[in-house]
Amino acid sequence: MKKLRIWLTLAALFSCSCMLQAAAFDYELIPKQVADNTYVFVGKSEDFSFENGGNIVNTGFIVTSKGVIVIDTGSSLRYGQQMRAAIATVSNKPINRVYITHHHPDHFLGNLAFKDIPVYALGETIQNINNEGAGFADNLYLMVGDWMRGTDVLAPSKTAKAGKFSIGEHQIELLALSGHTSGDMAVFDHTTGVLFSGDLIFHKRTLTTPHANIDQWLKTLDVLEGLPLKVIVPGHGTVTNNKAPIREMVDYLVWLDATFTKAANDGFSMTDAMRIKLPSKFQSNALLKSEFSRSVTHLFSKYENEVFERVN
Amino acid sequence: MKKILIFMLFLVPLSCWANNLVKDPLGSVQWDDMYGAFLKGYPAVFDDRVRVIAPSFAEDPMNVPVTVDASELKDIKKIVIFADFNPIPLIARYYPTNAEPVISFRFKIQQASPVRAAVLTGDNIWRVGGVWVNSAGGGCTVASTGRLANDWMDYLGDAYGKRWKKANSSRVRLLINHPMDTGLVPGIPAFFIEHLNFRNSVGDVLAHVELFEPINENPVLSFNFNVKDSSSEIYMTGSDNNGNEFEAEFK
């Protein structure tokens, strides 16, 4: 009996130490400078998990003399709070405004930490958050657990308009685009040449398609290619000083479209399409196999419908 | 404590009796019940030649794509397909009389569950294969999009598809507009396609499939029929649980 007690005590101690480790819930957000006055919190190129707490996204901020501009608020209340704390280590200027690039949960669920600040998004994005935000939040609670504590959907309070404006010494352009979703905002700083692309660009991390329109996305990438940009901050993946990520995006989207067209024409079912061999040139992109499989679920029925004819 | 012990004494022989069944490689507590509900009468074995192909995570719980492929087995009487943890586990029964024992479909999943196919062969043994599909859930208790838009009756029974002819077989893929209501959404009774029969132009049966509530809204199905004469048309007839009848023709 004594032995049993010792074991129980040891087991209890062990589980306590595990809990303590997780109880910190620290995303370890470190601002990485990518240009003058411009910083990025680089997330992991992974899917949501308890281990990463949902820190799979790139968010960022621009420091101007009129205040700080924040781009996206991350996946949880805790992420948003820790973002604010990390921004304060770089600048003592107040946060002037927040831009939300699109309605996916890893980009806006930190909004509650910015409820005292004007949060802007495109009209489509606000509508999409109102329609789908609660479901996204439920899903994230399921996937990353207690990291989400206190997180609730807070739709952006202000509708953003496309166009250029000056704030401090920075000239910023908001681009109202679509393709990854029905409302994708890109934030381009003409002063530094930094593009915050949101999820219009993934880099070395396979793109996701739950609300994608490939034709529209390709047109949008043409627009981004035409910008006089020096730095790309993708929604997911590594920051670059060249346009290579845009060409890689086009390459994958064109391949995806051609592959689904052929598979549908050849009579493939979804499960057949999920088992298509993936080209080696895309293998260096994280999560290739799982994202390709997800894309089949998202997009393949549209290709089937183009092949099917009325049979009664 | 004594009472519990006495209760346990009764339980032990009971559970031994139930566990004459082979152990479930997927480790589902529902396996014994599934056997009792859908397979009893014949012994069951787990057999890798019964392949159930599905993604490990249900990206869209309303449309989980599955292929069941038992083409390594001979002399197949029927294939029963079910998901242990669905509120309505039974998904389909397939009778591939003159068809390859391969069928693809999509279904609604309510929570993480094994998805299984049990194949009854001529020696009267159920040969069972399956995979776990993880899910955020909720696929069975959400109203269909046709119900939400309230336009399903405009399209009911409209069928789309295509036939791919090969030397000795024809692949047919088919979409039929139907809400496939599970009956689990308050105020919307179960309403689903029950039977689809496929015949060639001289009336020989190619295959018969029974569908159940978990099949997705506007079902999309794939079959491979044994058709030697590629000029012979393939006819489909079917009906739902409200007596609506459906037809289609594949040239």
Image (cartoon, rainbow, N blue to C red):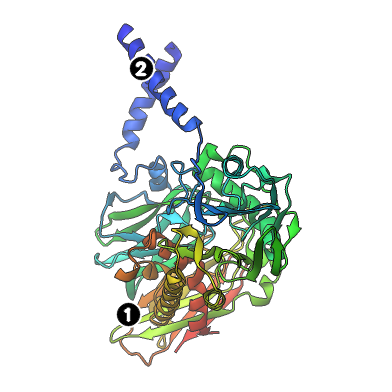
> Could you tell me which secondary element the residue under label 2 belongs to?
helix
Circle 2 chain: A
Q: Which mark is residue B226?
A: 1
Q: Please, is residue B194 above or below residue B134 in the view?
A: below
**Picture coordinates of residue B141, whole percent (x, y):** 60, 53
Q: CA distance from mark 1 to mark 2?
A: 65 Å
Res. B152 image quadrant: bottom right
Amino acid at pointer 2 = Leu
Instruction: Name the residue nearer the viewer: A204 or B120.
Output: A204
Q: Which residue appears at 44% of the width and 23% of the height?
A: A16
Check disc 2 and report the residue beneath it: A10
- Furthest residue in direction bottom, as rendered: B231
**Picture coordinates of residue B87, whole percent (x, y):** 53, 49
Q: Is residue B45 visible?
A: yes
Instruction: Name the residue nearer the viewer: A268 or A77.
Output: A77
Instruction: Name the residue nearer the viewer: B202 or A141.
Output: A141
Q: Which residue appears at 50% of the width and 52% of the height?
A: A33
Q: Which mark is residue A32?
A: none
**Picture coordinates of residue A50, whole percent (x, y):** 46, 41
Res. B202 image quadrant: bottom left
> Could you tell me which secondary element the residue under label 1 belongs to?
loop
Q: Which residue appears at 72% of the width and 48% of the height?
A: A117
Q: Which residue appears at 66% of the width and 60% of the height?
A: A169
Relative horizontal placement of residue B140, taking residue A252 as reference (left or right): right
Q: Looking at the picture, do discs 1 and 2 lie on one chain?
A: no
Q: Please, is residue B40 above or below residue B105 in the view?
A: above
